[in-house]
Amino acid sequence: MKYILALDQGTTSSRAIVFDREGAICGVAQQEFRQIFPQPGWVEHDAEEIWASQHAVAAEAVQRAKITQGELAAIGITNQRETTIIWDRETGAPVYNAIVWQDRRTAAICERLASVGLATMFQEKTGLVIDPYFSGTKIKWLLDNVPEVRERADEGKLAFGTVDSWLVWKLSGGKRHVTDVSNASRTLLFNIHTGEWDHDLLAALDIPRSLLPQVVPSSEMVAATGQGTFMPGVPISGMAGDQQAALFGQACFQPGMAKNTYGTGCFMLMSTGPQVRVSGNQLLSTVAWRTGGVTEYALEGSVFIAGAVVQWLRDGLGIIKNSPDVEALAASVPDNGGVYLVPAFSGLGAPHWDPYARGSISGLTRGATAAHIARAALESIAYQSHDALKAMERDSGTTLKELRVDGGASLNNLLMQFQADLLQVPVVRPKITETTALGAAYLAGLAVGFWSGRDEIAGQWSVDRRFEPERKFSEMEKLRGEWGRAVERAKGWEHAR
């Protein structure tokens, strides 16, 4: 047994990465899939396309690593969280497209829940705020709006799952309907204190218990690949939502250690160990993972649009041909020229939580160019992360000493330097930035004895580059003030129409 395979099912693409015992990448494959936008604010995926793309890249990565039967020790799965799928238990056919975490269609449902005084109950039990981001209101929408779905659900004929559940169902040939604690904690249905689906939460959203998967640890043998898959008989022994997996992959095992993942969205997590830290600053308390019989937690700041703003520059505006081109274009001007881009395409996440905010560009003059807009787009990622971190420091009572970073946009040196300047702490990029997939691999490998423990994992983490703050606090404070003005102008746009 020489390798672990990580399936990294993301918002815009499916990836598969083969790791060896030293945590080095031996084979990788990636495939983008369609983004479906039926109405403004709605975002969907084809669940069958998710499965087909993930299975295809798994087979390709194994082939590229030249793995033979018996050399693959286990599979770990990490996934875009909150994205909601309901399918038929007998046929395996989805009843509707997957509703993506970015989708805003349930904003009115969330308002109604808050208006009848349920916000406190949801936060106390789940650690979350009532927001369309999470799975629970998406399930309710499907039950209430797709013909015959509620009736079939009440009869026990349907299954709900986030993407991890969907992949395990497909990989196991429909034998296992499970989710891990980290993904369960993102549904608005899971009590993070008792570690169980909660009757009061299910009743508030009118969701039948029969829909829900069994909750399992993040590191445990839960299934095996079935016949017809790329390699039958391989244990599936690691599962975690993408951001929790990245926290594990960054070896942030001690309370107070934090990482930021720069993907489609931007997600900052700080480990709080076995203690649930309740946020007073609009952050989320979430399950980090459950291993060895112990559940550990984290504080999280969720930014909905990060790398996706660069995709918008490419696909929506057409000012860059390829996403990596944004760095050179942004660097062609010395600063943003007074331009601020607030990418609230899916509302604003932490610490604002405004589902009615929409994207805006402020400070445009005749002198503004595509380069200024590109720079403002990159800087918006850092500003949003800064806002989340400051709230996190207030909640935790600790000042961050360094920020570990990963994800595709962490390779952008201009962005990472600006982030260090904004935060006024070092930003540290590891040699392996695929820490989401690596975390899933570590969780899977620990369950089957591929790695001895966390000390061995922590010893494999190494630095690629360390970005030290270069600009003065007073200079950055002025820029942060201008950013704050731009954010206020983006808020509540849908109400104002």
Image: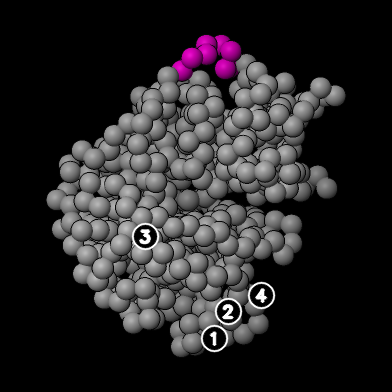
Q: Work out which residue is located at the far right of the displayed protein and give it.
A: 366
Residue holding disc 3? 64
Helix or strand or loop: what does disc 2 sit on?
loop
> Where is residue 4 shown, x and y percent of the image?
27, 58
Q: Does the image show residue 144?
A: yes
Dot placed on the residue nearer the N-terminal end, 3 or 1: 3
Residue holding disc 4? 145
Q: Nearer the viewer, mark 2 or mark 1?
A: 2
Quick check: is 73 in the magenta stretch? no
Q: What residue span does the magenta drawing correspond to?
A: 469-477
> Where is residue 27 shown, x and y percent of the image?
36, 55
> How dense is the environment of label 2, judged by Cα within 10 Å: few (below 14), some, or many (20 and up)?
some
- Three-letter amino acid code at the position of disc 2: Val
Residue holding disc 2? 95
Question: Which colour assignment does the render follow?
Answer: one colour
Check if mark 2's residue and mark 1's residue have beta carbons within 8 Å: yes
- Three-letter amino acid code at the position of disc 1: Arg
- In space, the residues marked 3 and 1 are separated at their CA atoms by 43 Å
Q: Nearer the viewer, mark 4 or mark 3?
A: 3
Check if mark 3's residue and mark 1's residue have beta carbons within 8 Å: no
Of the pair 119 and 129, the residue shown nearer to us: 129
Residue 207 appears left or right of 235: right
Dot placed on the residue nearer the N-terminal end, 4 or 2: 2
Residue 156 appears left or right of 439: right
- In space, the residues marked 2 and 1 are separated at their CA atoms by 10 Å
- Three-letter amino acid code at the position of disc 3: Arg
Q: Does the image show residue 397?
A: no
- In space, the residues marked 4 and 2 are separated at their CA atoms by 11 Å
Q: Nearer the viewer, mark 3 or mark 2?
A: 3
